[in-house]
């Protein structure tokens, strides 16, 4: 299909009167497609119109989609968006974590679909289009695996996307940028995405734009905050106090879990570790028996040195569901120690003995001795919550996520008067982040604070 034409028509410059002053719009049409560009100064608009007309007089064909002379083509016209996105993924992949790879593929999938010249044909299922892009085009492991080539249906979709993806110059059009921004902030059902997802997608796409600028595919970042009227959504850093659990509820839920047949006591020990030691779930599943110092009585100690986040086998280099990572927010090979409450020491000693766990083995192994799967412990927690909490409590955020056990632990430490610097050290956070997240949950010390200032602020009685 020919993408250029000599059929070009120019219109007089339009003057736009606005509160902030006049602006001037150059309008022209290439074949069937209309184009326009607005400038603040009439001289600039007249000059740009003259350049376009001069190119037309020299019989220079115009690109129908972009509306510009073909001779003006730059690197932005040499590659289309889909080809560029694949190139970016290939560059980013070796240095990215599994979660980063997965989130990058999701963002690029939404952007690619939003930028298509025409909507996908009716015989392409929308789910398959997204799957073809996310799990094959933007997944280096699957795309480059010679033993498992993409299914014919997937390859057909990707070939069509490649043909119908616009050149990189399409990012210069405001309407295309608006389409992408809308797609990145919208769920498949048309509802608004969570603010955290929008911010993450925005961060990913700005990195993509930065790569495009460095390699001369774009001159400026079209997603820059100062363009248009886009404002970043607000994300509440502080946790919702309603998600915290009280001691009675935790005790009831751990008892219910511990009574489950076969592996109930092991799951109970896992959740108790989050409640007593404030570990992240990905840190707890990575614990080895030898990482815990468990005396016969008194306090013990964990040596935390790795995390195993669950990202999916298609996103890791090893093909495993979990990815071995260093501790969050710490340098390579760094460690931290966390005290083990005497009650947790007893639970862990009992669990190690009951399941005959070895020092080099996992402290909380899965069914087959491998890493405990997130889908498993989340399902166990959800069942316990449904059984123990009242119907009203189940509809609230109370303990809705397994991570809420960590929130409860850290809040308890802070409310017990342990200095924030010490809590941050045990939790693996910085002090500013810790206070930003948990400041609203620190209670029980207000009466003491008021008593301290009561006498200091009291004014002396003036003699009559």
Image (cartoon, rainbow, N blue to C red):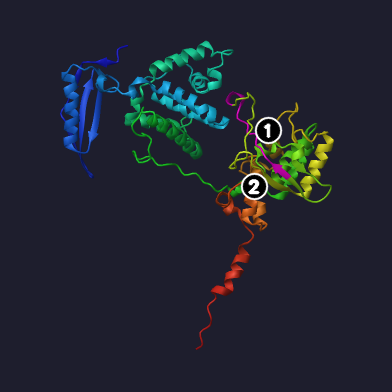
Residue 352, horizontal then vertical, whole percent:
81, 37
Q: Is residue 130 above or below residue 123?
A: below
Residue 298, horizontal then vertical, whole percent:
80, 51
Tell me the element at label 2: helix
Name the residue that disc number 2 marks.
427
Q: Is residue 291 left or right of residue 212?
A: right
Q: Is residue 442 above or below residue 401?
A: below
Which residue is painted at 53% across and 81% down in the image? 460
Q: Is residue 69 above or below residue 413?
A: above
Within the magenta stretch, is there residue 322? no
Name the residue that disc number 1 marks.
379
Tell me the element at label 1: helix
How far apart in space, not on screen, are marks 1 and 2 (Cα)? 25 Å
Residue 310, horizontal then vertical, whole percent:
63, 31
Q: Nearer the viewer, residue 259 or 265?
A: 265
Q: Within the image, what quadrant is residue 421 found in?
A: bottom right
Report the magenta residues as a range. 302-315
Q: Nearer the viewer, residue 390 or 171?
A: 171
Tally of numbered tags: 2
Residue 268 visible in rendering? no
Q: Within the image, what quadrant is residue 386 found in?
A: top right
Mark nearest the camera among 1 and 2 is 2
Q: Which label number is shown at residue 11?
A: none
Q: Is residue 234 left or right of residue 97?
A: left
Within the magenta stretch, is there residue 312? yes
Which residue is painted at 73% across and 30% down in the image? 366
Q: Is residue 219 left or right of residue 191?
A: left
User: In which quadrant will I find the N terminus?
Assistant: top left
Mark earlier in primary sequence (1, 2):
1
């Amino acid at each position: 299909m020919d993408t250029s034409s000599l059929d070009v028509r120019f219109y007089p410059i339009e003057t736009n009167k606005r509160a902030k002053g006049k602006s001037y719009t150059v309008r022209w049409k290439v074949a069937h497609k209309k184009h326009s560009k607005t400038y603040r100064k009439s001289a600039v608009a007249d000059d740009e119109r003259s350049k376009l007309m001069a190119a037309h007089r020299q019989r220079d064909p115009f690109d129908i989609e972009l509306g510009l002379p073909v001779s003006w083509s730059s690197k932005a016209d040499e590659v289309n968006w889909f080809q560029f996105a694949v190139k970016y993924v290939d560059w980013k992949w070796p240095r990215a974590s599994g979660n980063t790879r997965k989130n990058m593929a999701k963002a690029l999938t939404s952007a690619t679909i939003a930028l298509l010249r025409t909507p996908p044909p009716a015989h392409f299922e929308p789910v398959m289009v997204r799957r073809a892009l996310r799990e094959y085009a933007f997944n280096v492991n699957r795309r480059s695996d010679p033993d498992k080539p993409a299914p014919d249906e997937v390859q057909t979709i990707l070939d069509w996307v490649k043909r119908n993806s616009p050149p990189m110059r399409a990012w210069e059009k405001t309407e295309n940028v608006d389409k992408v921004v809308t797609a990145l902030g919208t769920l498949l059902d048309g509802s608004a995405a969570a603010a955290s997802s929008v911010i993450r997608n925005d961060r990913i796409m700005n990195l993509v734009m930065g790569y495009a600028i460095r390699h001369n595919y774009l001159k400026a970042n079209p997603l820059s905050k100062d363009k248009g009227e886009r404002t970043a959504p607000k994300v509440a850093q502080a946790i919702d106090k309603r998600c915290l659990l009280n001691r009675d509820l935790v005790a009831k839920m751990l008892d219910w879990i511990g009574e489950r047949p076969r592996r109930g006591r092991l799951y109970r020990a896992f959740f108790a570790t989050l409640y007593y030691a404030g570990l992240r779930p990905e840190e707890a599943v990575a614990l080895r028996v030898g990482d815990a110092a468990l005396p016969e009585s008194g306090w013990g100690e964990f040596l935390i040195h790795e995390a195993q986040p669950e990202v999916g086998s298609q996103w890791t280099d090893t093909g495993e569901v979990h990815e071995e990572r260093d501790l969050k927010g710490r340098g390579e090979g760094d460690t931290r120690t966390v005290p083990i409450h005497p009650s947790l020491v007893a639970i862990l000693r009992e669990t190690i003995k009951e399941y005959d766990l070895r020092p080099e083995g996992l402290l909380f192994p899965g069914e087959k001795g491998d890493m405990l799967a997130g889908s498993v412990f989340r399902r166990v927690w959800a069942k316990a919550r449904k059984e123990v909490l009242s119907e009203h409590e189940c509809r609230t955020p109370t303990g809705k996520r397994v991570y809420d056990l960590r929130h409860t632990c850290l809040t308890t430490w802070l409310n017990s008067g342990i200095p924030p610097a010490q809590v941050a050290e045990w939790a693996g956070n910085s002090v500013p982040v810790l206070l930003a997240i948990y400041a609203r949950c620190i209670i029980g010390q207000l009466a003491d604070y008021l008593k301290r200032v009561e006498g200091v602020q009291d004014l002396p009685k003036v003699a009559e």
